Amino acid sequence: MRLAACTAAVLLVALPVAAADMSKTLRTAYLAPETGFDPAASSDIYSDSVQRAIFDTLYGFEYLTRPYRREPRIAAAMPEISDGGRTWTMRVKPGIYFADDPAFKGRKRELTAADYVYSWKRLIDPRVRSPFSWFLQDKIVGADPIVEAAKKSGRFDYDAPIEGLQAIDRYTLRLKLKEPDYIMHGYMTQSPMAAVAREVIEAYGDASGWAMANPVGTGPYKLLSWWRGAQIVLEANPNYRDETFPDSTDPADRENFAKLRGKKLPIVGRIEIAITEESNPRLLAFNSGALDYVNVPSDLSDHVLDASGKLRPEYAARGVVLARITQPALQYAYFNMEDPVVGGYTRDRIALRRAIAIGFNRPALIRVVYQGQAIPATQPIPPNLPGHDESWNVAVQYDPAAANALLDKFGYGQRDSEGYRKQPDGKPLTITMASATSARDREFDEVWQKSMKAIGIRLDFMKQKWPDLIQMGKHGKLQMWRLGWLTAYGEGDAFAQLLYGKNIEQTNYARFALPEYDELYRASRRIPDGPERNKIYRRMSELVAAYSPWWLGVYTIENTLLQPWLRGYKKHAYWEHPWKYLDVDADRQKAAR
């Protein structure tokens, strides 16, 4: 018996692992349009989710492990860090191949260290104008002369050697930094630092060097079709490396995912993503079985959850599962600090911005729009991230009387015949807030307009599609805009960098430029996670409170509904759409539809 059992085990291991089931389709929905799928060029969360399925980073987060823990993906091991945090050496696993594409002229294209060198050079190429150039800009030893030459000539020399960014052999990558940067490991988990193939970018790139419509990577999926702003369809990449569903030390995981353990990834052959901006159609699509999972629109959460936050009986009776998490995200509104009305660092402009923040009815926003699925933000860094201090609160409290008094004190006391305030020089005070076009955005607009009217401020709205607002915001063309930021690399740095002066035109939409803040930000990167870095973050929060470039909004609670036929889903703070791990019971799925 013992010999037979051992033989069976050997035979079981030797059998080939099944590939993705092309007869299975997983369906979900986005609430806003994507912008495109070039890791160096796109910056919205919707495009990024697709990029994470197409491209590979050196490192990522383990799927099932809690607390969250980083792991090698394409890298053979964790980085070797030397020279006091300045030199990073990473080794790429051999035998990993890009998805087939005409750019490779019929040959199998292996991923090498040189692909990461090329991809990271794209982040600092001035022509590319990457929104994530701040990952590497001004940091790499020997890169500055190449960048400066590119600014003058309009052409980045990708073949010019850079001392601090080299493939020292086919599979070994070395990064040398001017000064220590302990956040770099987190950046290496993010899609802007994923590998692209030079042949692909040169074949499909536009005048900016962007290849938004032709993503070709080494990840579990490839782009099959794309109808902009309507639908994205992915198909399993047949060249994807041998990778199987992970084991877990958590007894609950071992029970829930027993049938998936050891299955080759990805499991499902096709992913369909609908772009559905309105809340009601998304929830109705889930209720009809047309979507396999969906994030609950917060404005409809009372349709799904009872007062205690549990699923309503009609959902529970159908076997629907609820997964929820307080996101590592901040919903905020920024003021353009270069704007002649709301910008500037003088006391009267600070008072105006602060009064707007004090006069905004955040309790009504949480109650009406979020229906209780959010909590007031207390500081720029959200909970459960390094740098967040539970005992610290720099946010202003809703107090329209105090807001009115502040405006009167700092020169905004004059009013027109309709009761709206004037600027200190007597000109009308009108603020224009950017807003997207969905019904949900209109709900936000109503709370903002009612709040501002109560303190005598005329508020107009400029309505544009989400992708257009992103571009306008980056280039300083919006006076004020409400948006959100979500970290996928588990560091408070993700929020601290949003106000770093050198990130203007990238992620610093407020165009905040304060030397003290900038120096603190640089200092925070030179120090490993711990109390000393947290003290720096606290001082940065104080400066945000003092100058009010933002209205600090809310931290959101995300609720996700899972159909009873969905398998393999575990809510992950840094991985919203873990498609390669998911499976569907096709018979139950079909019957429900």
Image: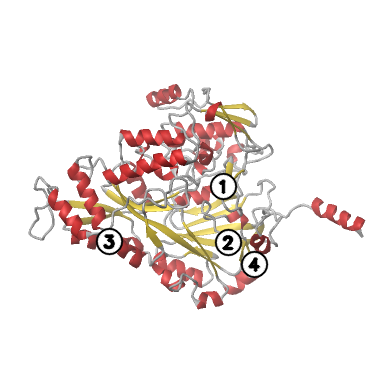
Residue occupying the point 49% across, 71% down: 310
Tag in front: 3 or 1: 3
CA gap between label 4 and label 1 equals 24 Å
Label 1 vs 2, first from the N-terminus? 2
Label 4 vs 1, first from the N-terminus? 1
- Nearest the camera: 193 or 258? 258
Q: Amino acid at mark 2?
A: Leu
Cβ–Cβ under 8 Å for marks 4 and 2: no
Label 3 vs 1, first from the N-terminus? 1
Q: Which mark is residue 361?
A: 3
Q: Amino acid at mark 4?
A: Asp
User: Horizontal and vertical percent for residue 555?
Assistant: 40, 56
Q: Which mark is residue 334?
A: none
Q: Amino acid at mark 1?
A: Ile
Residue occupying the point 58% across, 38% down: 103
CA gap between label 4 and label 2 equals 10 Å
User: Badge 4 is on which residue?
Assistant: 585
Label 4: which secondary element: loop
CA gap between label 2 and label 3 equals 40 Å
Along the horizontal axis of the image, is 226 left or right of 564? left
User: Horizontal and vertical percent for residue 112?
Assistant: 62, 34
Query: Is residue 207 among the parts visible in the rendering?
Result: no
User: Badge 1 is on which residue?
Assistant: 54
Q: Which mark is residue 26?
A: 2
Q: Is residue 583 above or below residue 112?
A: below
Label 3 vs 4, first from the N-terminus? 3
Quadrant assignment, res 31: bottom left
